[in-house]
Amino acid sequence: MIETHVLLIVLLAAALHASWNALVKGASDKLVSMTAVVLGHVPFALLALPFVPLPDAASFPYIIGGAALHVGYQLFLFWAYRQGDLTQVYPIARGTAPLIVAACSVLIFREALTTLQLVAITTIGCGIMSLVLVRGAQGLHNPHGAMLALVTGCFVAGYSMVDGYGARAAGTPVGFYAWETILNAIVFSCIVATASPGTLRKTVRNHKKIMAIGGGASFVAYALVVWAFTQAPIAVVTALRESSIVFALLIGVFFLKERLSLVKLVSAMLTMLGALMLRFSK
């Protein structure tokens, strides 16, 4: 059974994660807002470093690999948000991750998961993935947005596994993530500076609020998840984190004025059911 405090911390991380995604989606210039969130990680990471140990050398390859996967995730998430709604892109991107992580955990890494945990993870993943049936504002399906979201989900699964095992090897979850996110910001900034000259300067000058709020929420959210990876099976934490879909749906409907459909409602209920099952699984 997952400990109650671990469950609550992951749910808090889920709410924070949905919030910064909504901030990016709701912004008029999504590249600037995404850049602001990534750069906004750095001050929080630097503040954390004096209070945590240096990660063990065994975790250095994980830091490098994880940073590369995070960059891929951020780029594909940006492209996906240019094509689809928050309530379509976000759920599909997140829904694939728990299924992939669970499969890899059992088949490749031989991590023991109970039958109820597997059923709960599958329930969450399928519930979220059902949102591929959601139609866009014009009443049409959006296959391009869905495909970009699907690729984004593969990056989510990849960095979740790398970060989970990396944090365990590092011996300091927050220290591990702080160094990883600094490297992530450096690589992402180089890409943005090359592809869109002037964006970095514009971001730093005019979007300090997004850097502080979005970057802070994103850093804290994932630092909590990385810590949770060391307390419970990676597949369980990944699936539970995806309860953020419930928060994303609420934000999309009440703040971004996106339409609430029966499919979205059923998906949210299935996700909540899966999270409840994980709470009582042994």
Image: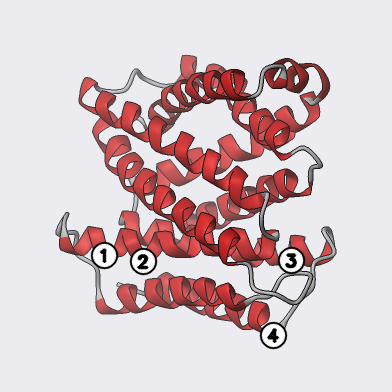
Residue at left 63%, top 67%? 142
- At mark 2, the secondary structure is helix
Q: Are marks 3 and 1 in contact (CB under 8 Å)?
A: no
Can you identify the residue that label 1 sits on?
Answer: 103
Name which residue type carries label 4: Leu
Name which residue type carries label 3: Leu
Residue 106 coordinates in the image, percent (x, y): 20, 63
Residue 90 coordinates in the image, percent (x, y): 60, 58
Can you identify the residue that label 4 sits on?
Answer: 262
Label 3, label 1: how far apart the Cα atoms are? 29 Å
Mark 2 or 3, nearer chain start: 2
Label 4, label 2: how far apart the Cα atoms are? 23 Å
Residue at left 78%, top 48%? 26
27 or 226: nearer the eye? 27
- Residue 250 numbered mark, or none: 3
Q: Are marks 1 and 2 in contact (CB under 8 Å)?
A: yes
273 or 183: nearer the eye? 183
Question: On screen, 208 above or below 15?
Answer: above
Image quadrant in which the C terminus is located: bottom left
Label 1, label 2: how far apart the Cα atoms are? 6 Å
- At mark 4, the secondary structure is helix
Residue 116 coordinates in the image, percent (x, y): 32, 79
Label 4, label 1: how far apart the Cα atoms are? 29 Å
- Asked if one can make out residue 171 in the rendered structure from this viewpoint, the answer is no
- At mark 1, the secondary structure is helix
Q: Is residue 62 left or right of residue 94?
A: left
Label 4, label 3: how far apart the Cα atoms are? 14 Å
